[in-house]
């Protein structure tokens, strides 16, 4: 049984809890305590399981591979026959992949064999075809053609043994898992249902695509970065559009969002001043904390519950939206999706290619471009680091993570970086 979620108020008793300057790690740990993963499951075809999370253990009903088989094209032999040095064996048959040799192979005999073909009874070793020569008198195998008994033979069960729990519940399904599931003969698997995530933008200045921009207005880009980041995490998204800065309209949007979704995400409207009425509204609709995270970009962040849904109130600035999503929401969604052992985003080391200015007292996530180098990777910033400069996110291939206690850093400093893309 999952214990009931602790009350958000309990947090305020923690020693390191200061809502006006909350360290990134403390906020992340606090959020983790409130997450209750989905439990509903569904059966899907193996292909549809891509990017889903397995909800039950997968136990193999047989060995993979099921039989000892050849790793090479060559000759299946009895190793003992090769002990005396150069030898010539008699060809007694063939073993093809999917068409095994029927008989047993005796002393002095050999079977032509191909990669993936079942090892004939009596044979224990395969001689590579390049090391043997077939002549009218038989198959000549020189001394030293194989180094040891069992060479070039794949063992039954060397990949997976019958009865093994190949995957545990909580395993994310990637292309490799699809292949392993297929090799086990799995046609359908049990996965957790998808997370439903509803989001909307707030701001009188925001226009939807297709609308005409008047002076001072901008297009709403946050719903597009959010859509992209959520789609990458394979969430079902519910886009509730732009909501004007009006308490009644925002309340309606929250009620609609919480009624349909597991998670509600908003952007804008949580900074000082704006937060005042949103605060009151959310106190009525749920239980939400308003934090100022000691980080840049992305200082204001609201977190809690609206109705039965988890709620993240992200800042309005486009870079801050993406950064707070990657640093807080992403991990939370992975946990809510049912993934076990969700690891922190891995951090690598790189040398600064130039000096970086930084204010002590907050963690900074600067957008960086990392380049491999002879003496290890180096990293430079993408240029202007304002939280409205969304193009910096597009230019970057990494985040440069500068710790709270650091100030300005000279060229050559070894810094932490988080990579934005892997080999996928
Ligand atoms: P706010 O947090 O609402 O004070 O917004 C901070 C800044 O982000 C302002 O410059 C807003 O115009 C901008 N902003 C807020 N929401 C969006 C959005 N959905 N798309 C683009 N910019 C936004
Ligand atoms: Mg606003």
Image: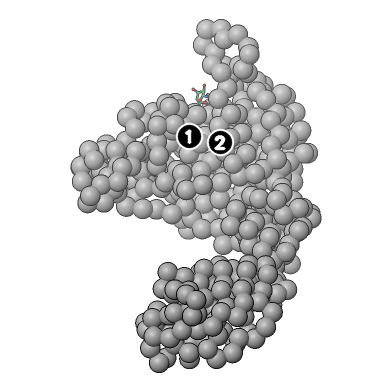
Q: Is mark 2 on a helix, strand or loop?
A: strand
Q: How crowded is mark 2: few (under 14 residues within 10 Å), some or many (20 or more)?
A: many
Q: Can residue 155 be seen in this view?
A: no
Is residue 289 depicted above or below 137 in this figure?
Answer: above
Q: In which quarter of the image is residue 96?
A: bottom right
Question: Which residue position is annotated with label 1?
Answer: 320
Label 1 CB, ligand 1: below 8 Å? Answer: yes
Circles 2 and 1: CB distance less than 8 Å? Answer: yes
**Residue located 55% across and 32% down the image:** 225
Q: Quadrant of the N terminus?
A: bottom right
**Residue located 44% across and 31% down the image:** 394
Q: Quadrant of residue 132?
A: bottom left
Q: What element carries label 1?
A: helix
**Residue located 41% across and 73% down the image:** 131
Q: How far apart are marks 2 and 1 (CA)?
A: 8 Å
The image's mark for residue 189 is: none
Residue 214 spot, x, y in % from top left: 56, 7
Residue 108 spot, x, y in % from top left: 52, 89
Q: Nearer the viewer, residue 20 or 41?
A: 41
Point out the tag, 2 or 1, that comes first from the N-terminus. 2
Q: In which quarter of the image is residue 63?
A: bottom right
Question: Which residue position is annotated with label 2?
Answer: 314
């Amino acid at each position: 049984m999952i214990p009931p979620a602790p009350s958000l108020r309990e947090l305020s008793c923690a020693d390191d809890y200061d809502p006006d300057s909350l360290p990134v790690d403390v906020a992340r740990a606090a959020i983790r305590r409130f997450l209750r993963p989905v439990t509903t499951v569904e059966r899907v075809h193996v292909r549809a399981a891509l990017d889903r999370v397995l909800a039950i253990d997968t136990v193999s009903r047989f060995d993979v591979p099921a039989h000892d088989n050849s790793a090479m094209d060559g000759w299946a032999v009895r190793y003992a026959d090769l002990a005396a040095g150069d030898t010539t064996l008699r060809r007694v048959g063939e073993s093809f992949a999917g068409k095994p040799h029927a008989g047993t192979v005796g002393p002095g005999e050999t079977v032509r064999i191909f990669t993936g073909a079942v090892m004939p009874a009596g044979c224990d070793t395969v001689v590579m075809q390049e090391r043997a020569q077939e002549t009218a008198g038989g198959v000549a195998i020189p001394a030293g053609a194989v180094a040891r008994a069992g060479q070039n033979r794949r063992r039954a069960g060397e990949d997976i043994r019958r009865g093994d729990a190949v995957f545990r519940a909580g395993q994310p399904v990637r292309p490799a898992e699809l292949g392993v599931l297929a090799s086990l003969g799995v046609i359908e698997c049990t996965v957790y249902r998808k997370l439903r995530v509803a989001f909307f933008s707030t701001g009188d200045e925001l226009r939807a695509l297709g609308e005409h921009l008047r002076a001072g207005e901008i297009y709403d880009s946050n719903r597009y970065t959010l859509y992209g980041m959520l789609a990458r995490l394979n969430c079902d998204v519910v886009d509730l559009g732009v909501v004007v800065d009006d308490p009644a309209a925002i309340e309606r949007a929250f009620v609609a969002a919480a009624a349909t979704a597991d998670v509600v995400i908003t952007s804008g409207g949580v900074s000082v001043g704006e937060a005042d009425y949103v605060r009151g509204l959310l106190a009525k609709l749920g239980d939400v904390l308003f934090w100022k995270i000691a980080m840049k970009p992305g200082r204001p962040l609201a977190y809690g519950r609206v109705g039965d849904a988890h709620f993240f109130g992200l800042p309005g600035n486009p870079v801050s939206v993406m950064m707070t999503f990657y640093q807080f929401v992403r991990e939370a969604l992975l946990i809510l999706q049912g993934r076990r052992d969700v690891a922190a985003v891995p951090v690598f080391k790189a040398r600064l290619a130039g000096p970086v200015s930084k204010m002590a007292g907050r963690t900074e996530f600067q957008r960086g471009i990392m380049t491999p180098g002879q003496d290890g990777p180096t990293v430079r910033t993408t240029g202007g680091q304002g939280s409205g400069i969304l193009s910096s996110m597009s230019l970057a291939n990494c985040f440069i993570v500068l710790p709270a206690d650091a100030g300005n850093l000279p060229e050559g400093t070894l810094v932490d970086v988080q990579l934005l893309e892997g080999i996928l």
